[in-house]
Image (spheres, helix red, strand yellow):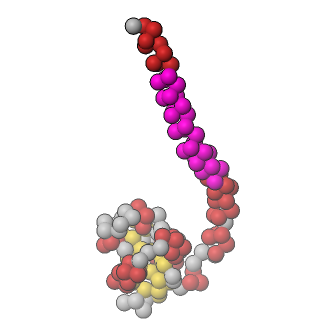
Amino acid sequence: MSSKIFTFEDVAKHNHKNDCWLIINGKAYDVTPFLDDHPGGDEVLLTSTAKDATIDFEDVGHSDSAVEMMQKYLVGEVDTNTLPAKAKHNSPPPTLAPSSSNQSSAGFVLQFLQYVLPLLILGFAFALQYYGKKTKPEEN
């Protein structure tokens, strides 16, 4: 069963909830029966169809038991000559680089607010307490 060789186009056709195949490390896996059980949800698997999902799979850091579990879903090998050129995989990171710098600046603002906002609230509470006590005795 695992000796069957598929082209990228063959595997890419299996890209929906009722028929979901993934390409990981040059092998084709029919993960359709696993969609409902996947801890990350079925959407994660479905968005990894019709492409080489090796990087997606490795970036998550799956456990050894998850890697072993994959063997029961193995349907065959993928002819690596039919995979899309790696240049297509290299083009997304440059578009991600500016957003990651935006994320780091956004992260700085968020971190700054985590310290300043509580101090402002604390200062406001003290001011309210101070001025609140001064005005109350004068009213009585």
Is the residue 9 above or below the residue 114 in the image? Answer: below
Q: Residue at x 39, y 7 (%)?
A: 140
Question: Where are the magenta residues, as a range?
Answer: 104-130
Please tell me which residue is depicted at 54% across the width and 44% down the height of the picture: 114
Q: Residue 115 versus residue 34: which sits nearer the camera?
A: 115
In percent of width and height, residue 112 lies at 60, 45
Q: Position of residue 91 (x, y in %)?
A: 66, 66
Q: Is residue 115 magenta?
A: yes
Quadrant housing residue 39: bottom left
Quick check: 45 above or below 77? above
The residue sitting at the bottom extreme is 3
Magenta region, main secondary structure: helix
Q: Within the magenta stretch, is there residue 54?
A: no
In the image, taking residue 100 as reference, residue 58 lies left or right, namely left
The residue depicted at 67 percent of the width and 72 percent of the height is: 87
Is residue 41 or residue 105 the one in the foreground? 105
Residue at 38% x, 78% y: name it.
66
In terms of depth relative to the viewer, which is nearer, 93 or 10? 93
Q: Quadrant of the N terminus?
A: bottom left
